[in-house]
Structures are given as structure tokens and as C-alpha cells.
Image (tube, rainbow, N blue to C red):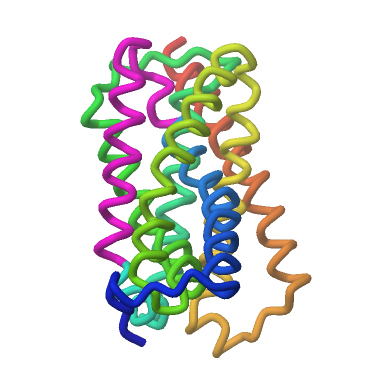
Amino acid sequence: MSPDLLGHISFGWEFFAALLSIILIDLILAGDNAVIIAMAVRSLPRKQRLKGILLGSGAAVLLRVVLTFFAAQLLQTPYLKFVGGLLILWIAVKLFIEGNPVEEVHREAKTTWQALWVIVVADITMSVDNVLAVAGASKGNLFLLLFGLGLSIPFVVFTSSLLSMLMDKYPYIIYIGAAVLGKVGAEMIVTDPVIVEQFSPSKVFQYAMEALFAVGVIAIGKLWVRYKIASRK
């Protein structure tokens, strides 16, 4: 399905229905990316956070534009989602440790580029599903596709900025963020084409794994923090 040219836009009911679908998809899918960005920039000095959020959001959208042309093929690549899910779980634990609200752990100050690297790596693994959802809703209309990708920038910037401020005021939100990423990682692993073909996991099993990993990343993060504290005594 090749995208229509901009000159073939028909502003009928189907166009506006697709437009509304894309806006809703962007609103829903912005959450996962915003959690990653907010947690990644939390350890930055306050003056650098906006720069990190803007760069991270811009990089995320640029990646989505590139991934748009390969999304369908990438989703069928064996073990890609499985490995991506493991990577998201590792990032979830890493960001939880760095932003842990209770036990203070000595760590080097993170730079904007280090935070950006975490955001980019995480977004590469999470964006294929998002891109495919927007591409499907656009029904091959290039204008709608580009609009959907562009609209995700302000959604992600606003949501990640809000989450970053809330994490400062209510540090325990870090737990929610880590749990969300744990859930996303588990979902990617269970829905990998090879896993689906070999084991045909049920929805109940998928939900159980998502709950297990949501709690698991927090438990592993807390154990690691306590180990580091104990090893310094």
C-alpha cells in the first residue's frame, strides 16, 4: 500500500474519521515514550531537562519517520520484539535505579547526550508498533501519515515535561513509570512472532506476564540499590 500524494487529499468523512483515529492513537501511544523520556531526563540538572526532552522527542519522531517504511517487515522479523522487550526491561531497571526515590545511590551526573542515548535506544524498540498503528489509521494517505507523526511531538513533549515535574514533586511516580515499562517489555516479548507461533500464549498468560514483569523490574531495581548500599558499608 503506497501513500497517496498530497494533491489527492479528499476532505470527506473517511478523511476526518482517520484524522480523529490518528489523534487518539497519538494521545494513547505518547504515554510510553513520555515515561521513558521523563525518567531519562530526571537525573539531569533542571536547566538541561527541557533540552533533553526536546531532543529526545525530536529524535523519537525522526526515528518513526524512518521506521514507517520498514514497520510491517520489522514486526515479522524473528526475535526482534523479544530482544527489544528484554532491552526495555533492562532500561526500566536502569532508570528506576537512577531515579530511586528512597535509597540514595552514588552515581555520576548524567549528561544530556547520555539521556538522549537511552531515549533513542528505547524508542527504536518501542516505536515499530506505534508507527504501524498510525500507518494503518492513515489508510495510505501521506498527509495523514506525516500529520500523525508530527502531532506526536507536542504530545510527547507536553506529557514528558508534566511527568518530569510530577516525579520531582511525587518521587514515587518512578515506581509507576518503571512498572509501565516492565509491562511494555513483557508485552513485546510475549507477542514476538516466534513466541506466538511456537507457544500461542493466551491473553490471560500475557496479562500475567505483564503484571509479573511490572513488579519484577521494581523488585530487581530495589534489590540492586540495596546491594550497592550494603557493599559501601
Q: Vertical placement of 53 versus 122: above or below?
A: above
In the rendered structure, which segment of residues is drawn in magenta?
Answer: 39-67
Residue occupying image coordinates x 60% and y 55%:
24
Residue 197, x across and y down, in percent: 55, 89
Q: Is residue 220 magenta?
A: no
Which residue is rendered at x = 25% and y = 31% of the image? 114
Residue 61 forms part of the magenta stretch: yes
The image shows a total of numbered marks equal to 0
Which residue does the image show at 59% across and 19% down from the upper left?
A: 166
Quarter of the figure with residue 147? bottom left
Quadrant location of the N terminus in the rendered image: bottom left
- Apparent side of residue 51 relative to residue 201 in the rendered image (left or right): left
- In this view, the residue in front, 205 or 35, is 35
Q: Nearer the viewer, residue 8 or 228?
A: 8
Name the residue: 48% across, 75% down.
Answer: 136
Residue 49, given in percent of the width and then of the height, sits at: 35, 20
Q: Position of residue 229 (x, y in %)?
A: 49, 17
Q: Measuring from the top left, give residue 135's x and y in whole percent.
A: 43, 71
The secondary structure that dominates the magenta segment is helix
**51 over 58 or under it: above or below:** above
Q: Where is 20 relative to 33, above or below?
A: below
Q: Looking at the image, is 103 positioned above or below residue 30?
A: above
Residue 127 located left or right of residue 183: left
- The one nearer the camera, 214 or 33, is 33
- Which residue is farthest left? 113
